[in-house]
Image (cartoon, helix red, strand yellow):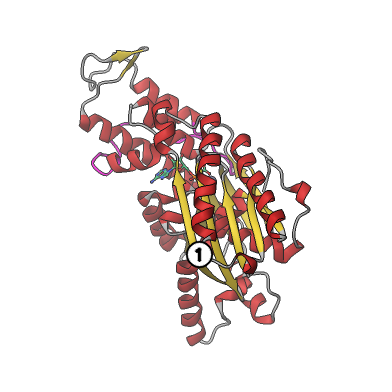
Amino acid sequence: MKILAIETSCDDSCVALLNIKRGRLKILSDFVSSQTKIHAPYGGVVPNLAVRAHYKNLPILLESVLSKTDVKKIDLVAVTTGPGLEPSLWAGTNTARILAMAMGKPIIGVNHLEGHVAANFFSAVIARIRRQAETKQSRGKTAGSPRSIYPERSRRARDDEEGIFPAICLIVSGGHTQLVLIKKIGDYKVIGQTRDDAAGEAFDKVAKLLGLGYPGGPVIALKAKKGRSDAFKLPRPMIDSSDFDFSFSGLKTAVLYLLTPPHPFLSKGGRKGGVVKKLLPQTVNDLCASFQQAVIDVLIQKTIRAAKDYRAKTVMLSGGVAANKELRRQIEKIIKIQIPRTQFLVPDTQYCTDNAVMIGMAGYWKYKRSGGDKMEKIVAKANLCL
Ligand code: KG4
Ligand code: ZN
């Protein structure tokens, strides 16, 4: 099945063409046009600039993808309908509707968060599951082809699903921080989420406080490499609460307090709005490392506890913050120590952040579950839930 996928939920214009044959994914084209440079001066995404850029970028990306393929052979158009920034979502949904109508093809609206979950099932990861399954098989245990993780209902498929699910997926992006219990593909239950800022949002806001630009995650991760994570004592909000919810706005405020004079470790001068802007480079590195570690500690502790409570066979990471190397390294290590029978999946870093391949994959799952959507259903749903 050939799927043309479009993703415009925030500030990346993404178009991909994929071919899924018997559940196996082949990426034929995959384009992401980043708007980082447009929004960086504002320290965050500016909606009307985002939508303007989407309408400018989408035709260029679509021309690149469609000029290399026989359009008649496309079977499905998949597009993100939500959640996200409403004007951005309209750019994608309107474009997808026009395309599907012009091509006479079915269309499917995709939940962006199911897309992030789907990124765990791309080829590299699938290959790893296959290797693990083969190792198990050689030890005489039940295992099978990884294609069975897709909703094709063979006996073998059920066996494999039993090897992966229930799974706990931590979705950590700029807009979301959620712990999701996945009983099978299409069966999602949000067991915890942030009560205020998302983890990625906290990275972005702290980077803004430190004058490091937008998006904050990658630059904080880079500076953190050269810093000491125990240099500053920062809170771990809600780390011991009995639920699976998160809260990151207090952590951001704690960094703000550290930056509010007088403070002995800060260099003099450069005050703006009561916050010291000129910091010694090592102070910035230490602040980044300490902040990053506080976020990681909370995310890992809650995820591991959820995995234990729900007896998860797999822990998955998704979303832009899942690209954070320290988070990936530390959670993998703790899983190996504390819940060694649980397997760990994480997308390649390029598929942690927004992309259209994940939307195509989730669109395929949904299409197999319930068929195509009516054209009038393809509308922007800014607050769509999983
Ligand atoms: O999933 P995504 O591309 O867009 C949303 O759906 O929100 O995530 C973007 C978020 C941004 O907040 C960005 O700062 C964060 O992911 N991010 C990171 C890293 N790379 C991106 N956060 C921490 N470490 C990173 N390496
Ligand atoms: Zn996202």
What residue is shown at x 51% (from left), y 59% (from top)? 65
Measured from the top left, where is residue 243 in percent x and y?
60, 42
Residue 163 screen position, x and y as percent: 58, 72
Magenta: main secondary structure equals: loop
- Quarter-wise, where is residue 310 in the image? bottom right
Type of residue at label 1? Lys
Task: From the viewer's perspective, tell me whether residue 104 is left or right of residue 357.
Answer: right
| Left or right: 233 as drawn, with respect to 172 | left
Q: Is residue 273 visible?
A: yes
Residue at the spot 45% in from the left edge and 77% down from the top edge: 131
Magenta residues, as a range?
Answer: 224-248
Front in this rendered view, residue 370 or 33: 33
Where is residue 348? Give x, y as percent: 43, 59
* Mark 1 residue CB less than 8 A from any atom of ligand 1: no
Quadrant of ligand 1: it is top left
Horizontally, residue 33 falls left or right of residue 145, namely: left
Is the residue 135 above or below the residue 107 in the image? below
Question: Which image quarter is the N terminus in?
Answer: bottom right
Q: Is residue 137 above or below residue 213?
A: below
User: What residue is shown with label 1?
Assistant: 68
